[in-house]
Image (cartoon, helix red, strand yellow):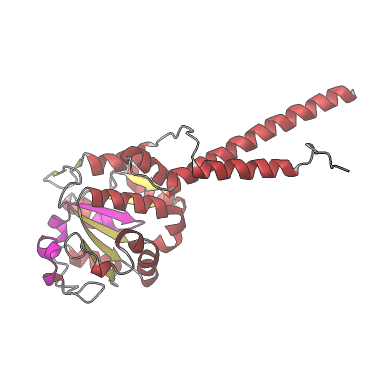
Amino acid sequence: MATRLNLKDTRWIYIMVFGVIYISSLAPIALPVPIVQWSKDFYSVINEGVTVDFADNPREFGGVEEDTRVFILNSGETSKLWGDMSEAVTTVWKDLRERDANILLWSSSPDNAATLNKYLLPVIYGLEPQNHPDYGVKFVNLGYVAGGNQLLEQWKDSVSEITPIDAYGNRLEDLPMMSNFNELKVEADLMIGLDARGLETIYVVRYNTPVLEMGGTDSASYLALSYTAGYFKGMIMGQRGGAEYEILSGIPGNARSYLQNTFTISTIMVIIMIVTNVRYVLNKQEEN
């Protein structure tokens, strides 16, 4: 005897939710994504530039273009934030490469270095970044170097005097990119902090160095304070920030799909709540 389809079975709700999420993963639904001002400012600095004028001589930064020297600081709590920031960091990094920037990377702790070595660098440069054609010419990885803010204080005058070799044992003086990327207080055109701290007092206020910030939501209170004080010229937070950057830059990535899935689930749950409540009210009226 054939089994009748029971549409009142609540398991159909879960099947429907799974189906919509799966379909939106393959072809994201074009739900509108409001872009917050912080993300707009972040992209604007990279695309158009900014003027930083804390010190006496204002510094004009004209945006990232060929050979722009970008110092990326992988510090703070990056290892814990990576799950929240992975797509944003990847998309921004791709944008820097497309603009032909020179990228210098430093990690402030072993686990921070291991996180990017395992998850980011293979996506961009393969399993052996030191053998990529860009290495030493457009990208240099200092790896983990201990010292924190004290190290940043020393690097302002010279990186090579304090740290003569990179993460793979190459001498910095033998890497073409480092010929004019040594005195960070004047030769770093832009700094991007992955939850980095201390940049504002060492570089922004003293030397008018433009700084962009990428951090997770658990750091929001600190970052918002620094941002509103004018230290950071733009900020991206979480996978949503990554999705916003993908939209602004036009660079494809996974963050927008993740965000669309979140919107889809939220929309479905709201519809289910409305339908359930309406049905409950109608049933009550019938009973009365």
Q: Is residue 229 above or below residue 167?
A: above
The answer, for residue 182, to whether it is visible in the render is: no
Q: Is residue 166 above or below residue 190?
A: below
- Name the image quarter holding the C terminus: top right
Between 157 and 4, the residue placed more toward the observer is: 4
Magenta region includes residue 175:
yes
Q: Position of residue 141 (x, y in %)?
A: 25, 66
Q: Residue at x 36, y 64 (%)?
A: 116
Q: Position of residue 189 (x, y in %)?
A: 17, 52
Q: Does residue 137 appear to the left or right of 146 in the view shown?
A: left
Magenta region includes residue 17:
no
Q: Residue at x 14, y 64 (%)?
A: 178
Q: Which residues are magenta?
A: 174-202
Q: Residue at x 19, y 59 (%)?
A: 138
- Name the image quarter holding the N terminus: top right
Query: Residue 144 sits in which quadrant?
Result: bottom left
